[in-house]
Image (spheres, rainbow, N blue to C red):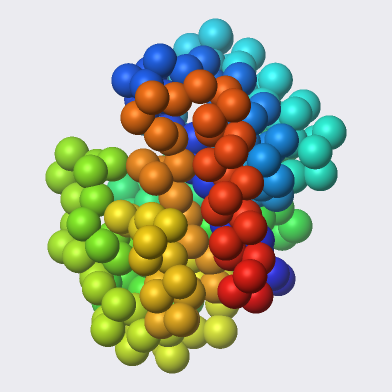
Amino acid sequence: MVLPRFYPILDTALLARRGLEVVSAAEAILQGGAKILQLRHKTHFSRDVFSQAQRIHSLCAAAGALLVINDRADMALLLDAALHIGQDDLPPAAARRLLGPARLLGFSTHNEAQLRAALREPVDYVALGPICGTASKLNPDPVVGLKELRRLRALTDKPLVAIGGITRANAGEVIAAGADTVAVIADLIPDECTKQSLRSRVEEWVSNLELRT
C-alpha cells in the first residue's frame, strides 16, 4: 500500500479558531490537490457534525481522495470511510473486526514500545510522533525527533506516517529520515485563513513533496 506523501488533517477545533467552516476548508484542501483527508473532531459528534462529514465524504469521492475518520469506528462505517485510531481508542483488532479486511486502518504510536506493539496489530499503516514540538495537542507525548525516527524506521516495512510539528521548512528532513508520509495540522491552516489561502497552502505542500518523490 502506498499513501500520498501529503496527509492533511482537518482539525475542527483549529478551524473554529481560524474562523473557517469545515466543509469549505475540505473543499479548498481537495481543490489544492490532496488525495487523502482526515477529519479530526475530538468533541461530541452531533447530527450537524455528521451532516458535515457526509458532505466532506461526497467531496472526497468526487476528487478521487480517501476520507479518513479520526477515532470513531462507528462514524467511519456509516460514512464508508477509512479509520485512524490512537492509543486510547478502540483496540486495533476490535476496530478491524468492525471494519472488515478491506478498509484502511491507521494507528498512532509515540515511542518504540508502542511501535513494536503496533506491528502485531491488523493495521495498514502506523503513525509516529510528535516528530517535533507541536501545539495541536493539550498534553502532547514526548518529542520523537529525527534521529529516533530514522532508527525506528528500520523496524517496519509498513507505511510510516510522521506527525507532530511538521512544517514546510522541516518536511524534507522528515522524509529524508524515513517517513513515507507527513501528516500536517497546524502548518496546513494559515493564521489569517480564507478558502483561497488554504487552497494555496495545500498547493504549496503538494508541490514541495512531489519534488521529493
Q: Residue furthest top?
A: 48
Quadrant housing residue 199: top right
**Rendering coords of residue 43 (x, y %):** 36, 23
Q: Specify whether 133 is left or right of 164.
A: left
Kindly identify the residue that appears in the image at 54 percent across and 33 percent down. 198
- The relative height of residue 60 versus residue 145 in the rendered view (above or below) is above
Kindly identify the residue that appears in the image at 19 percent across and 50 percent down. 140
Question: Considering depth in this image, is 92 or 187 the residue closer to the camera?
Answer: 187
Kindly identify the residue that appears in the image at 41 percent across and 82 percent down. 177
**Rendering coords of residue 204 (x, y %):** 57, 50
Give the quadrant of the C terminus.
bottom right
Determine if residue 43 is in view.
no
**Rendering coords of residue 4 (x, y %):** 65, 61
Q: Specify whether 55 is left or right of 87.
A: right
Quadrant housing residue 51: top right
Give the quadrant of the N terminus.
bottom right
